[in-house]
Image (cartoon, rainbow, N blue to C red):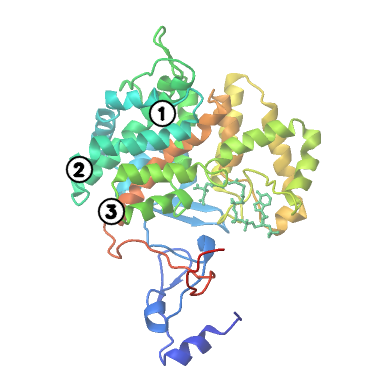
Amino acid sequence: MGTKNVNAIISEEQNDNSLPVLDGTLGPSAVDIQTLYSRNGLLAYDPGFRSTASCKSSITFVDGDKGILLYRGYPIEELAEHSEFIEVAYLLMHGELPSPGQRKQFDEAIGYYNLLHEQVLSFYRGFRRDAHPMAIMVGVVGALSAFYHDVMNIRDANDRELAAIRLIGKMPMIAAASYTYSVGRPQRYPNNKYDYASNFLQMMFGAPNREHIVDPVLARALDIILILHADHEQNASTSTVRLAASSGANPFACIAAGIASLWGPAHGGANEAVLKMLMEIGTVENISKVIERAKNKSDSFRLMGFGHRIYKNFDPRSLVIQKQAKKVLAHLGKEDPLLEIAMRLEEIALKDEYFIERKLYPNVDFYSGILLRAMGFPMNMFTAVFALARTAGWVSHWLELQGESHGIDRPRQLYVGKTLRHYTARK
Ligand code: SDX
């Protein structure tokens, strides 16, 4: 195993060692290596896909060096400022912002399909009361395949759109039910007098023995959180959805696979891990110890909410969330010492050579837990809120890849195991 100039390898085998280069509309070009193996018997090795474009997509663009995030070309900051989650979901799915008539139709469809089949609610009784909401959501969303898989034809564009609408519509009730079940409160139903974010809040925090007034400041803050988390190009959970979908699996099973992948602490589970880390730090005085631990290679500890595979600059989402966290805390007249610790931690880390050299900045998860906690969400619901939002991106990628023709995703490997040997029973 040595290093060789690729041209040297290819030209030994093949006089034509040229490979096409594909240009996108934004971002890096890509060397098309689809014929590398068939022409040269060579594989490209890229664990973690640091240099691999797994597909072409028109949905979201991220420039990690500049801290740019565009949904269908629109900057995330503008969408967070001026749009609403359901409008953004439509944009991600269809590629354009809806006209007033399209928006009304989409709102009505989401509202029509936001109820769960009563038998799905019986699934919740099978879980322990202390089951993590993500465990429940993986199970319940996957189980929707038992209710809708047979009534849809993924080859039919209308059926595909309906499946996407059902998933976006039902996620708030699925997520809220996993919380109310854990605290022994009766499941609440959606009420379409509320908008999407407010409906989720009333299902989360309402109770049958009183009228629940949704605070518009909290509803708007949640809607912005949903916009910010809606999509992020080929992240681990979206790639999981795409890979599952490439086998022709139904959308409910594919989104359940995405939820499972998002749960990991290196991905969507980081928001919960950040809050646990901030609580463990406890006081500003302990920050330097934690920074040293994060830098210590013999310590597996990582500064949760810091770093990103693509962002080597500020994650534009974390800046918006920090602002919303301050706004909501001020609105509620609350002080959260963890916000002070988080801001000091950010300030100290960003001056530290280790973080500067590795371009480690706060990511979307660094402040989101503080904002969600201020709104009353328990820690174990943070990733469930992330999954609720990312369903819009997941279904949009699921819809986009239906038009792809490269067949099932089937990565190869560099085999480093035993060579051929024959069986003899062990004495
Ligand atoms: C999300 O992909 C997406 O788009 C995801 C997401 C989305 O919207 O879908 O943006 C959402 O998942 C955000 C990320 C949430 N995860 C965390 O906050 C967990 C903490 N972060 C790290 O685990 C890490 O930064 C990752 C997983 C996010 C990125 O890991 P990479 O790209 O594999 O980085 P790396 O391991 O190659 O790190 C490069 C260096 C290493 O040090 P050296 O070996 O070069 O000496 O940076 C170090 C790492 O040890 N490093 C950290 C660190 N993150 C990277 N050191 C301390 N603390 C950290 N958080």
Mark 3, mark 1: which one is toward the viewer?
A: 3
Residue 282: percent from left, percent from top: 74, 30
Mark 3, Cα crowd under 10 Å, few <14 / some 14-19 / many 20+, is: some
Q: Secondary structure at mark 3?
A: loop
Q: CA distance from mark 2 to mark 3?
A: 13 Å
Mark 1, mark 2: which one is toward the viewer?
A: 2
Residue drawn at (20%, 49%) of the image: 157
In the rendering, which numbered label is found on residue 248? 3
Residue 381: percent from left, percent from top: 51, 30
Residue 100 seen in this snapshot? no
To which residue does mark 2 refer? 152
Question: Mark 1 belongs to which amino acid?
Answer: Ala
Residue 182: percent from left, percent from top: 48, 21
Q: Answer with left or right where residue 13 lies relative to residue 406.
A: right
Nearer to us in this view, 276 or 193: 276
Q: Closer to the N terminus: mark 1 or mark 2? A: 2
Question: Mark 3 belongs to which amino acid?
Answer: Gly
Q: Secondary structure at mark 1?
A: helix
Q: Closer to the N terminus: mark 3 or mark 1? A: 1
Residue 331: percent from left, percent from top: 57, 22
